[in-house]
Amino acid sequence: MALTAEGSKFYFSTTFGAAKTIASITNANPAVATSTAHGFVDNDELLYIGGWEDASKAIYRADQLSADTVALKGVNATNTNFYSPGSGVGTLQKVSSWTEIPEVVTITSDGNQQEFIDLRLISSRYAQKIPTGFTPGTINMTLVFDAGSAAYQAMLDATMSRTLVAFKMVLSDSAAIYAYGYISASKAPQVQAGQVIQVPVTFAIQGQFSTYA
């Protein structure tokens, strides 16, 4: 089913619960974290920061299994080349509140794409593309300029303090996209005759996007 941006809502959060230590985490799909008396319930939105680079600094939904174990839906840690056994320990924090981003006029996203380097062997006439890392991810928005908006002022505060924030986009069919990174809200509105005055806001993603149907 094809989706459009119309009807989507956007949120950010600077508020996280206390960090819960991960004592161990399994190489499973989804990965299961052991954290004593974690207190999480199903579908809590959790920030994972840990030793698995390909999953760290991102937001995942919880599947509460017991008082001490929780699965991170969307984390497939079965590839031990990238999810080294025993090295995924770290912390989990619940996103404890969201602030809606009002009056979004435009939004684009890019990055988190595979990068390549060229390899040309003397013995071959055909060069090869070798995958390396991933490009940085960004979300770029423009909002209707409203200097009195509490949400806009909160974004400016997070910008000036270099606060890492969670980001959520909820599509019209309730699918959700999450990310975690730095927010940059401009104090300088974009003024042009014949158009609504707007202000740019950028999220610089630190990990990868996570998506849920």
Image (cartoon, rainbow, N blue to C red):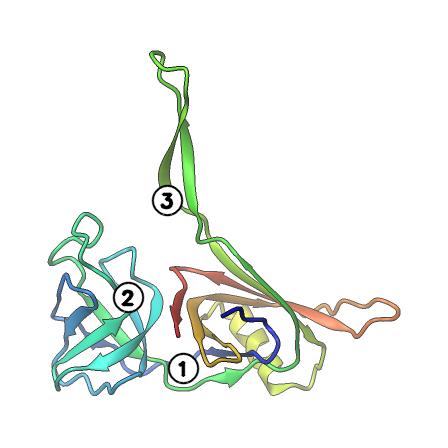
Pointer 3: what residue? Answer: 133
Along the line of sight, which residue is nearer the eye, 110 or 125? 125
Q: CA distance from mark 2 to mark 1?
A: 15 Å
**Which circle, 3 or 2, is nearer the viewer?**
3
Q: Indicate whether 26 appears above or below 8.
A: above
Check disc 3 and give the amino acid type: Gly
Q: Residues within 10 Å of mark 2 (few under 14, many from 20)?
A: many
Instruction: Indicate the quadrant where residue 67 lies.
Output: bottom left
- Name the residue at 20% across, 65% down: 29
- Name the residue at 84% across, 66% down: 192
Pointer 2: what residue? Answer: 49
Along the line of sight, which residue is nearer the eye, 9 or 185? 9
Pointer 1: what residue? Answer: 15
Q: Secondary structure at mark 3?
A: strand
Outermost residue on the front side: it is 1
Q: Residues within 10 Å of mark 1 (few under 14, many from 20)?
A: some
